[in-house]
Amino acid sequence: MRVAILAHEKFPDRAKTALGVLRYADYDAVAVLDRETAGQRVNDFVSDVQDAPIYESMADLEADAVDALLIGIAPIGGGFEESWREDVRTALEGGCDIISGLHYFLAEDEEFTQLAAENDCELRDVRKPSDDLTVSQGIADEVDAEVILTVGTDCSVGKMTVSMELARDAREAGYDAAVIPTGQTGIMIEGWGNPIDRVVSDFTAGAVEEMILEKGDEHDYLFVEGQGSIVHPAYSAVTCGILHGSMADKLVLCHDAGREAIHGYESFSLPDLPTYVDLYENLAAPVAGSEIVAGALNTSNLEDDEAREAVDAYADAIDVPATDVVRFDSETVLDALL
């Protein structure tokens, strides 16, 4: 499928959905839409993802150039920015489907539904959960697969990226591994999944368990995409639901090098790194014997020498093997996990 990815005024640093799709999805990215960087290319900013030209708006593309417009931004709260409306409208008028991971459902927008009907387009709200979810049975540990969950010191530290990278590296090493997608970007990449942060609270653990039961006897290793952080003032409930619902065997602690305060809630400082090991393992303990056995550090804001030193310091701080899975080799981390 040929897609244009909407990332207005956020690309690349605050457009993690766009980057995830460019790095891992099978879509053919024809264009990225970003008013601030229009006229440049994706690889001018990020070299290790699919390249594409950057345009100011959908109106700058040929009418039949793309099959779908994908919303590549995941703002806090998941709202729809009205400045995007013209691009969505233009896409629908040109016969393009819309793929969105927002909490704002485009299929419930009167203008968009009318345009979609008139132009035979699909509005895909991937953050809309299934209607048949229910509470957890506490049986995710009965599957044959080893369950590995990425957990974080904060939101937006790379849990989805780490899950994708480790699963891919495991497969390349000859292991039978799959990803359990729990967020909008993972669902867009994998083509299935439950959007855990949109699920009724009572059903959060059950929604994770359902996916593990579905895939757990088909693969040897399941890499569960984590969400939020156990210390996050807004997202901790989602994190706990995934931790308990997955009944993970092993955990990978993800962190963003140099981050000291919670993203979007900067009045809250991050705890010391070793504190997270105790927090996650103790919270999991009544349900499953989950242990943090590896770490993943996002060093994208550091030079190479600084990044190596930061990874070594991170590994020492949490007392397990660690790496930056995008920048460096993941072998030592995979050895601890597989």
Image (cartoon, rainbow, N blue to C red):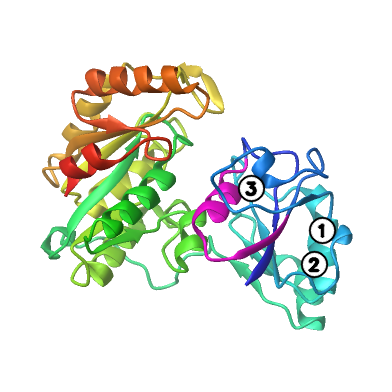
Indicate the position of residue 103 as horizontal and vertical percent values: 59, 54
- Tag 3's secondary structure? loop
| Residue 91 circle label | 2
Q: CA distance from mark 3 to mark 2?
A: 17 Å
Identify which residue, 172 or 30, lies in the foreground: 172
Q: Of helix, strand and loop, which one carries label 2?
A: helix
The amino acid beneath tag 1 is Asp
Amino acid type, mark 3: Ile
Residue 27 spot, x, y in % from top left: 58, 65
Quadrant in the picture for the N terminus: bottom right
Residue topped by disc 1: 87
State the separation of the CA atoms marked 3 and 1.
Answer: 14 Å
Q: Is residue 331 above or below residue 231?
A: below
The residue pinned by badge 3 equals 73
Which residue, as the protein is rendered here, is positioned at the far right?
Answer: 59
Res 210 seen here: yes
Q: Is residue 39 left or right of residue 199?
A: right
232 in relation to 55, above or below: above
Residue 64 falls in image quadrant: bottom right
Residue 237 appears in which quarter of the rendering? top left
- Residues 183 and 46: in front is 46
The residue at 25%/18% (across/down) is: 317
**Which circle's residue, 3 or 1, is located before the other in the chain?**
3
Q: Is residue 134 left or right of residue 16?
A: left
Kindly check if marks 2 and 1 are in contact, taking CB atoms under 8 A apart as contact. yes
Residue 19 included in the magenta stretch of the image? yes
Q: Is residue 131 left or right of residue 138?
A: right
Over which residues does the magenta segment extend? Answer: 15-31
Which of marks 2 and 3 precedes in the sequence?
3
> What residue is drawn where x is 17% and y is 32%?
282
Does dot 1 land on a helix, a strand or a loop?
Answer: helix
